[in-house]
Image (tube, rainbow, N blue to C red):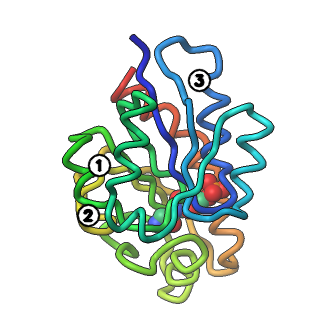
Amino acid sequence: MPLRIAIFASGSGSNAENIISFFSSDPRFEFPVIISNKKNAFVHLRAEKLKIHSVTFSREDFESGESILYFLQSQQINAIILAGFLLKIPIKLIQAFPNKIINIHPALLPKYGGKGMYGHHVHEAVKNAGETVSGITIHYVNEHYDDGNIIFQAKCSVLPTDTSEIIAEKVHKLEYEYFPRVIEEIWG
Ligand code: GAR
């Protein structure tokens, strides 16, 4: 039986697309749906191109978790990947999918994590702190932001001349390279 994975994404969705393309001819994984909290997110256009159903739930739905859980069960989803998803995951989902929800964070947790630390905010904080190294963290999701057990980290150098955009590019490169491989490693 293939693992049926729902991808949650709030923005561009380049990681979502990369993961789906990576597993496109792998019978062990199915990606029946992308779930967003933003109706106008670019990820919906990527989903359309990939011929994958995408849906939007409101912030209130995410806070309660009830309608989302019902929807995921109706789609026979077994696992969830957060790929640039910015809302907290409700406890109901965490309990319903034990060790089956993972997140990618664009820095080396526990540094630069927590509420409000997403996307460019992370890279700006790394730059302003004068870090010489940044990277990615893939971790299990618990009820706190960026706090679950770490599965994998990879590093990239940060030069004094790097802008936050350049750091973002380096980090995205690591994400594209490693996120699918880690998924394969833990769930394949
Ligand atoms: C990624 O860099 C991901 O690590 C980050 O958002 C970006 C989404 O890019 N996630 C977070 O900041 C979560 N705290 P994408 O939409 O192009 O995949």
Would you name the residue on which mark 2 appears?
147
- Quadrant hosting ligand 1: bottom right
Where is residue 187 drawn, in percent x and y? 36, 26
Would you say 76 lies left or right of 178 here?
left
Residue 176 is situated, as x and y percent measured from the top left of the image, at 61, 43
Residue 27's disc is none
- State if disc 3 and disc 2 touch (CB < 8 Å): no
Residue ID for mark 1: 140
Using the image, determine if residue 85 lies above or below residue 125. above
Ligand 1 within 8 A of label 3's CB?
Answer: no
- How far, Cα to Cα, is label 1 from label 2? 8 Å
Instruction: Classify mark 3: residues with Cα within 10 Å, few (<14), some (14-19) or many (20+).
Output: some
Mark closer to the chain start, 2 or 3: 3
Say which residue appears at 69% left-offset and 52% top-offset.
43
Question: How many numbered discs sit on the rendered protein?
Answer: 3
Q: Which residue corresponds to mark 3?
A: 23
